[in-house]
């Protein structure tokens, strides 16, 4: 029973409690990774935007214990996100850490590392830790010598592992959905770039015309450019999936086979340069009357800021799916909504029949060149409306919309499932950690 679970300190149950490097070597273009608090995610360390340091400096920091090991628990230690992000190291990480990240190495005979991660993820625990172990007014910081005294209610190791199994099953589903969404996003971007930026199907047709006058060869060249399939693979597709083959052929036939000059450079014949405003309505968001930092029964409409959800309001500004970009402050982040929302007054709202095409356009704009702000970044409705874009043939646009819309519909479905999974996980977490809910009962809740 939970009443029998002992209360211990982190120092009692961890073999090591330390942080990363307190000195920051110079960055290099090609070296070894050095991660900081900004590179932490709930699913691990993301090195995609981490800076690199010289190999010699890296090796010195490894010797100083700044490279985490498999089974270590990492937690944000410094800055505004202190104690808000925690993850485990599940596979060897070829990176060292800065001091903004704390490294905890559990005593595996007492403490499961994933259990410790979930302990740090509980809202009540985070509130307890922030109230007792953060210092510094300008820059919040966790002092490790005090942090060692943090208390943890420790169930037996076998119970820990059962709790972890329940929570990991939910997290694994969430992570898989995130990975699927990232793949779908990347696929839509690749199609957009191939069709409307690099004009690969058109160029494939031009090359085929130069090599042969056979119309079938020209179409097949575009089909290969669109699908990435060889002639042999196209033959196989035709034999095994004739409907998909016909659909691919129909798409390929929509592309022109010559280029023409325009103010944006060479474009496929029949296409033209135009303003984004021809394709989309652009307006500013509004300041809400009331706002809540937390979602609840009354305040449940997302308040969308320049880069993320800022809170929640009790009124709806847009019922339909819209695109939102920053007007003041942060620029370059394109947000899409699939549910009723309220964009704030520091945003611009974009609506279009060609929602998916415009989404890709917005992701490709150089917002820095549109900035007219002096004290803080600012872009105007007018500058976005007059951004020059490629306007292709309508039938090809419709085809792109259909393909992309199906991808983003799946993304929306995955996001909805993830929200439900997160809600379930967050409701189970404190009850499991405290012993209020047995693991067997949690299994039943998850199954439902």
Image (tube, helix red, strand yellow):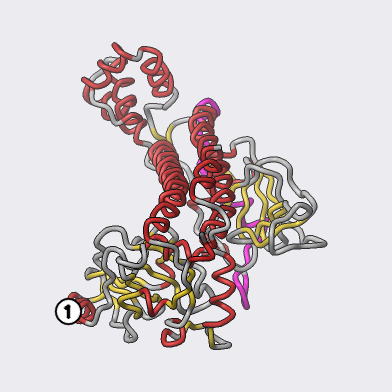
In the image, is residue 354 above or below residue 220? below
Q: Which of 87 and 286 is in front in this view?
A: 87
Q: Is mark 1 on a helix, strand or loop?
A: helix
Q: Quadrant of residue 381?
A: bottom right
The residue shown at (29%, 27%) is 224
Q: Nearer the viewer, residue 273 or 289?
A: 289
The picture places residue 152, in percent across and down from the top left corner, at: 48, 72
Magenta stretch bounds: 373-396
The picture places residue 271, in percent across and down from the top left corner, at: 49, 34
Residue 182 in view here: no
The residue shown at (82%, 62%) is 289
Question: Few, some or many C-alpha atoms within 10 Å of disc 1 (few <14, some 14-19, many ≥20)?
Answer: few
Q: In which quarter of the image is residue 288?
A: bottom right
State yes or no: residue 390 in magenta.
yes
Q: Which of 406 and 366 is in front in this view?
A: 406
The residue shown at (58%, 42%) is 416
The picture places residue 77, in percent across and down from the top left corner, at: 45, 77
State yes or no: residue 214 in magenta.
no
Would residue 70 be found to the left or right of residue 387 on screen? left
Would residue 188 be found to the left or right of residue 92 on screen? right
Which residue is disc 1 drawn over? 56
The residue shown at (42%, 51%) is 168
Residue 431 in view here: yes
Q: Which of 429 and 225 is in front in this view?
A: 429
In the image, is residue 9 above or below residue 235? below
Would residue 99 be found to the left or right of residue 62 on screen? right
Residue lying furthest right: 289
The picture places residue 7, in percent across and down from the top left corner, at: 48, 73
Q: Quadrant of residue 29?
A: bottom left
The C terminus appears in which quarter of the rendering? Answer: top right
In the image, is residue 382 above or below residue 63? above
């Amino acid at each position: 029973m939970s009443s029998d679970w002992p209360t211990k300190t982190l120092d009692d149950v961890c073999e090591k409690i330390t942080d990363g490097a307190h000195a920051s070597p110079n960055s290099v273009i090609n070296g070894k990774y050095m991660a900081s608090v900004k590179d932490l995610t709930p699913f691990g360390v993301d090195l995609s935007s981490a800076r690199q340091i010289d190999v010699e400096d890296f090796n010195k920091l490894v010797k100083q214990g700044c490279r985490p090991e498999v089974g270590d628990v990492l937690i944000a230690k410094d800055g505004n996100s202190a104690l808000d992000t925690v993850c485990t190291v599940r596979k060897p990480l070829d990176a060292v850490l800065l001091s903004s990240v704390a490294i905890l190495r559990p005593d595996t005979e007492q403490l499961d590392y994933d259990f410790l991660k979930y302990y740090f993820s509980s809202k009540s625990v985070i509130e307890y830790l922030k109230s007792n172990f953060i210092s510094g007014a300008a820059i919040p910081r966790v002092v490790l010598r005090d942090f060692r005294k943090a208390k943890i209610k420790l169930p037996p190791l076998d119970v820990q592992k059962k709790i972890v199994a329940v929570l990991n099953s939910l997290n694994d589903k969430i992570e898989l959905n995130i990975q699927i969404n990232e793949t779908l996003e990347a696929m839509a971007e690749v199609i957009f770039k191939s069709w409307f930026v690099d004009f690969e199907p058109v160029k494939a047709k031009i090359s085929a015309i130069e090599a042969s006058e056979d119309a079938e060869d020209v179409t097949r060249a575009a089909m290969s450019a669109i699908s990435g399939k060889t002639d042999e693979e196209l033959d196989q597709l035709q034999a095994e999936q004739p409907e998909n083959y016909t659909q691919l052929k129909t798409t390929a036939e929509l592309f022109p086979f010559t280029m023409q000059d325009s103010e944006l450079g060479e474009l496929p014949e029949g296409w033209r340069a135009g303003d984004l405003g021809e394709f989309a309505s652009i307006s500013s968001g509004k300041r809400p009357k009331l706002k809540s930092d937390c979602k609840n029964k009354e305040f449940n409409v997302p308040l969308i800021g320049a880069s993320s959800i800022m809170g929640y309001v009790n009124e709806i500004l847009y019922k339909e799916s819209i695109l939102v970009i920053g007007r003041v402050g942060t620029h370059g982040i394109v947000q899409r909504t699939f549910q009723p929302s309220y964009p704030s007054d520091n945003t611009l709202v974009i609506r279009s029949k060609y929602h998916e095409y415009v989404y890709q356009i917005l992701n490709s704009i150089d917002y820095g060149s549109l900035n007219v702000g002096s004290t803080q970044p600012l872009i105007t409705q007018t500058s976005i409306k007059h951004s020059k874009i490629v306007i292709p043939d309508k039938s090809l646009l419709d085809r792109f919309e259909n393909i992309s819309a199906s991808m983003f519909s799946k993304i929306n479905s995955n996001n909805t499932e993830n929200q439900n999974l997160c809600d379930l996980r967050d409701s189970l977490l404190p009850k499991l950690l405290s012993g209020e809910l047995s693991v067997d009962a949690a299994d039943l809740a998850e199954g439902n």
